Amino acid sequence: MTDTIAQLPSSSPIPARARKGRRIEPTYLVYAASIVSMVALWHIISTTFFEPAFFPPPGLVLSTGYEMLRSGELMKHVGISLQRILLGFAIGSLVAAPVGLLMGSNRIIRAIFEPYINFFRFVPSIAWLTPVVIWFGIGETSKVLIIIYTTVFIVMINTIVGVSNIAPNKTRAAACLGAGPGQTFLYVTLPATLPFILTGMRLAMGNSFATVVSAEMLAADSGLGYLIFNSRLWMATDRIFIGIVSLGVLGILADWIFRQLILRYASHYGPVE
Amino acid sequence: MNDQRPATAHGGPILLAENITFAYAKQATPVLENLDLSIQEGEFFCLLGPSGCGKTSVLNLIAGFQQVTGGRLTLAGQPITGPGVDRAVVFQGEDALFSWLRAIDNVAFGPKMKGMSRHERYETARKYLNLVHLSGQEYKYPSELSGGMKQRVQIARVLANDPKIMLMDEPFGALDAQTRGKLQDELVEIWRATQKTIVFITHDIAEAVLLGDRVGIMSKGPSSRIATIIPIDLPRPRRRGYAGFGDMWEKINALIDGEEAAGDDRASNDGAAAKISLVHRHEGHAELVRK
Ligand SMILES: Nc1ncnc2c1ncn2[C@@H]1O[C@H](COP(=O)(O)OP(=O)(O)OP(=O)(O)O)[C@@H](O)[C@H]1O
Ligand SMILES: [Mg+2]
C-alpha cells in the first residue's frame, strides 16, 4: 500500500496493476500512531485554551455521539443523507455514462450537448437550490435532483475524455477483426472507457457529499447538513463535531467500498503499459 | 521442407498499387508519391525504409484505415475502400491488444465477431496460441505478459481470423535481439504452414534479408516511393552466418546509401531521418557480425 495521497481520486484512470495484498504493513501502524497523537493534541488544545462550548474535547464529543447513537437520532440523519447521496449519485451516473459514451463516439451528438456542458459545469448545484425548491417542493425530489446535477457533469466529462483516449490501434484492430460499428462500441469503446467512468464516479461521490450538506443546511429538516446547521442555533458544538466526524467517516467508507469494487471488477481495464 | 521455391513462383498479384499518392489532411508535400507496388499471393514481402519515410502509411492504406489521394490501390482487382477481414494487421505498438481481455479472449475476438460459438472460438484461440508457443498463458491479461508474448498474442489474434494477407508493422522492433531472432524463425514457420501473404515492415536490413522473398526499399520521405525491389534468392531456412547473407546485406546497404545520397540532393532538410536510418544500419551490422 502506498500513501493516502496516491489513493485520492484523480482524473487519471486506475493503474492497470492495482494494489493488492492483505498483510498489515508498517504504513497502518503509522496511520494509527498519527490518529492517536492527533486526538491527544485535540484534547490538550481544547481543554487548555477553550471553553468546552467553543471547542469540545474528544471525550465530550464521544459521549454526545454515544447518546445520539443510542437515541437513534444520529442514524436517522446519517441514513437520510446517505439515501439522498446514493440515489442522486446512482441516477446521475446512469444518465451521464451513456450520454458521455455517445458524445465521445459521435461528433453530432457531442455538438448538441457540448455547449450546455461547458456552460452548466461552472454553475454550482447550490445556485439552483431556490428554483429547484420552487419547482419541485421542499421534499426529497429537490435534494436528489441537486445531487444528480452535481454528478452528471463530472461523470460525463470523464467519460468523454475516456473515449477520446482510446488508442486508435484498438479500434483499428477491431475493424480488421470484423467488428462493425455496434460491436466496436460494445466490445471496445465501452470496456476501454470503463476506468474513466469509474474515476469520474469516484470524484462525483466526493462532490455529492459536499452538495448534500449544503442542500440540507439551506432547505431540510433532516440529514447531517441539517444537524450541523441546526446545532449552531444553540451553540451545540459537540453535535456539530458529530456531524463533521460522521461525514468524514462516511466519505472514507464510501470511497473504500468504491475502490474495492474497482479493484475487484475493473483492475484489468486500465491501459496496457 | 520444399522451401527452395524461387521468389517469383507465387500465385500472381494479389495486391496492386498503381502510381498512388497519399497526403494527410492539409499537408503540402505528400507522404507518398507515384508509388508502384505489386505483391504476389503467398509472398513474404518486406518493406524496408528509414524511420518516417511512410512505411506505416503504406500499411494503413492497404489495411483500409486511410484512403489514397491519387492512383489506384487494389486487392484481387477490387479497390480498397476500408478495413476488411481479408487483411489483418499486427500493429507496431502493443496498445493494439485489448487490455481488459485475457490472451485467449484477445485471440477469440475475431471469431466472436463472426458469431462463432463460445466453444468453437476458444478451441480456435487455443490452437493459435499453441502455434505461437503461448500454451499455458491463455488466461493472462496483456499487462501480465512480456513484450515478446504480447507480439505473439497479436500474431495469434490475426491468424485466428484467417486473413488472406497479414500486414505486420515492425512487429519485433521493440524486442531484444534474442527474442526477436526466435520470433523471426517462428514467423517463417507459420508462414510456411499457412501459406499466407505477408507484408512485413522493418527498418532492419538483416531482418529483411532473413525473412523476405523480396525486399522493397522505400526512398526517404517526403514524397516517398518504392525505389528498388530486390529479390532475396537465398535458400531457406536462412541463417545470418550463411553464404550470401552478408553479400545481400551489403548490396541492400549500398542501395540505401545511394538512395539517401539521391534523397539528400532532392531535399537536404531532413537530416534527422537520415541519421536515424544510419543508426539502424549500424545496429543491423553489429548483429550480423555477432551471429
Ligand atoms: N496522423 C498524421 N498526420 C500528419 N502527418 C503524419 C501522421 N502520421 C504520420 N505522419 C507523417 O507521415 C510521414 C510518414 O509517417 P509513417 O508513420 O508512415 O512513417 P514510418 O516509415 O512508418 O516511420 P517509423 O519507421 O518511424 O514507424 C512522417 O513524416 C510523419 O510525420
Ligand atoms: Mg511506422
Image (cartoon, coloured by chain):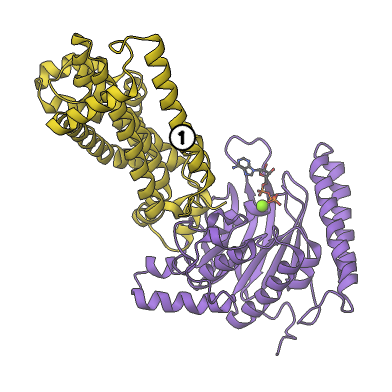
Chain colours: A yellow, B purple
Q: Is residue B111 visible?
A: yes
The residue depicted at 45 percent of the width and 58 percent of the height is: A174
Query: In the rendering, at what x and y percent does residue A132 appear?
Result: 16, 19
Answer above or below: position of A186 versus A43. below
Relative depth, front residue between B74 and B41: B41
- Inspect the image, locate mark 1, and give the three-letter code of the amino acid beneath it: Ser
Relative depth, front residue between A56 and B6: A56
Relative depth, front residue between B237 and A67: A67
Query: In the rendering, at what x and y percent does residue B110 appear?
Result: 44, 67
The residue depicted at 19 percent of the width and 9 percent of the height is: A233
Answer above or below: position of A140 versus A27. above
| Label 1 crowd (10 A; few <14 / some 14-19 / many >=20) | few
Query: In the rendering, at what x and y percent does residue A218 appear?
Result: 19, 15
Determine which residue is flagged by label 1: A10
The residue depicted at 60 percent of the width and 66 percent of the height is: B149
What element does badge 1 sit on?
A: loop
In the picture, measured across the screen, residue A7 lies left or right of residue A141, that is right
In the picture, measured across the screen, residue A238 lies left or right of residue B42, that is left
